[in-house]
Image: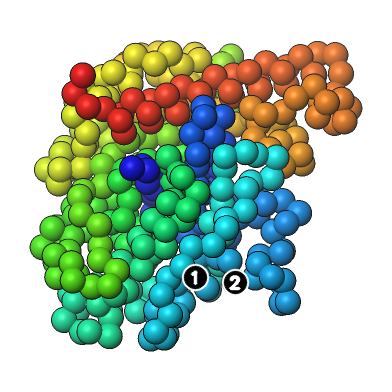
Amino acid sequence: MPTRILLFNHKGGVGKTTSAYNIGWKLAQREHRVLLVDGDSQVNLTARSLGDRFEDYYDEGSPTRLNNIYDAVRPVFEGRPTPIEAFDCPEAENGSNLFVLPGHPDLSSLEGQISLAQETRGTLSVTKNLPGVLHRLIALEEERHGIDFSIIDINPGLGALNQNFFMISDAFIVPTNPDPFSLMSLKTLGLEIERWVNWKETFGSAFKDATYPLPTGVTKFLGALHSRFNRHKSKAAGRYHDRISQIDNRIEAELVPALRMSGCLFPLAAYEAAANVALPEAATDADKRRLYALARIPDFAQVSHIAAEFGKPVFNIDDDDLREADLRGNVKTSVQDNIATFDAIFSAICQKIEIISGYDGG
């Protein structure tokens, strides 16, 4: 069975899309078949993943124009007797075993109907199929492409559409960055997740006889991912280190207990096993062993720009790319060091994901 992972934080600007892209790439490099699902109406994950082929999925007259998440489910929302069908998802640019379910800017227009369906709790036959539609489409694509992991990127927010993506996922990662708003968002996050879990437990069974039922089970917390901070001597500099530590402390003291009450945690032994995975010094808290932090990701600005230029993640930049970027001497050496660090960080993140999500009590 594929594992479906949601990148979720209702605060914007925390690197959800970049993290989804890099995690998907690295899992594919680790010999998994991966589906990147773009559930964000800004479609940045689709654009990043498809490169020059991006417009082929939206231009009028293009044979692949309707091969996206919105047009695939739209007939159900319009009440048409057309079954949901899978299509051939494109592979990511320069990638293998990494497929993309393209997003669409009109996906957010489905918010009202999904909200009504969830509010009426399956009592209206016209809306009964809607909460399970996205699950059905993704499941069909996972089956068609033999997927091991699906990575879902969504927009910031706490609306019905994001609630739906949360309820149809197996696990979730909370990306943050070192600002006071990430710290504040953790309080709201725990309360909303509790509400969503309670809704599914109470009303999910009302949709079991729908054509597209909701999946059973509770979405569980894989860990937090702290990104976009400045480095100083391989550490998060000054106040950034302090802020990330504050975020970790709040996750441990407030978010994790709330998730435990909702049944949204894996066994403690799973997090303990994952915490044994070695991380580069720049990606960890030297002051404390953090069970619920997947990693800290420094802001390798120059390297990130090079990666975007060549349509690949940072850890895939090679010597040919560096030559084309005209990097030499100490600058080239510094960039190569950053690439190696970035590769080690995401290898460790994906190893942790494998351990926690696949934990069987052994």
The residue that label 2 is drawn on is: 66
Q: Is residue 40 left or right of residue 91?
A: left
Q: Pick the residue in front: 5 or 72.
A: 72
Q: Is residue 199 left or right of residue 90?
A: left
Picture coordinates of residue 253, whole percent (x, y): 20, 33
Q: What residue lies at 46% left-to-right and 67% top-to-bottom?
A: 85
Residue 117 visible, this angle: no
Q: Pick the residue in front: 164 or 229.
A: 164
Q: What residue lies at 28% left-to-right and 35% top-to-bottom?
A: 251
Using the image, tell me which numbered label, if any, was put on residue 361: none
Q: Is residue 293 left or right of residue 178?
A: left
Q: Is residue 126 above or below residue 270?
A: below
State the quadrant of the N terminus: top left
Contact (CB < 8 A) between labels 1 and 2? yes
Mark 2 nearby-residue class (10 Å; few <14, some 14–19, many ≥20): some
Q: Quadrant of residue 285?
A: top left
State the quadrant of the C terminus: top left
Q: Is residue 242 above or below residue 204?
A: above
Q: Is residue 114 above or below residue 306?
A: below
Picture coordinates of residue 170, whole percent (x, y): 30, 46
Residue 140 visible, this angle: yes
Q: Is residue 159 above or below residue 296?
A: below
Picture coordinates of residue 202, whole percent (x, y): 10, 63
N-term-proximal mark, 1 vs 2: 2
Mark 1 nearby-residue class (10 Å; few <14, some 14–19, many ≥20): some
Mark 1 residue type: Ala
The residue that label 1 is drawn on is: 72
SS state under label 2: loop
Q: What residue lies at 20% left-to-right and 54% top-to-bottom?
A: 216
Mark 2 residue type: Leu
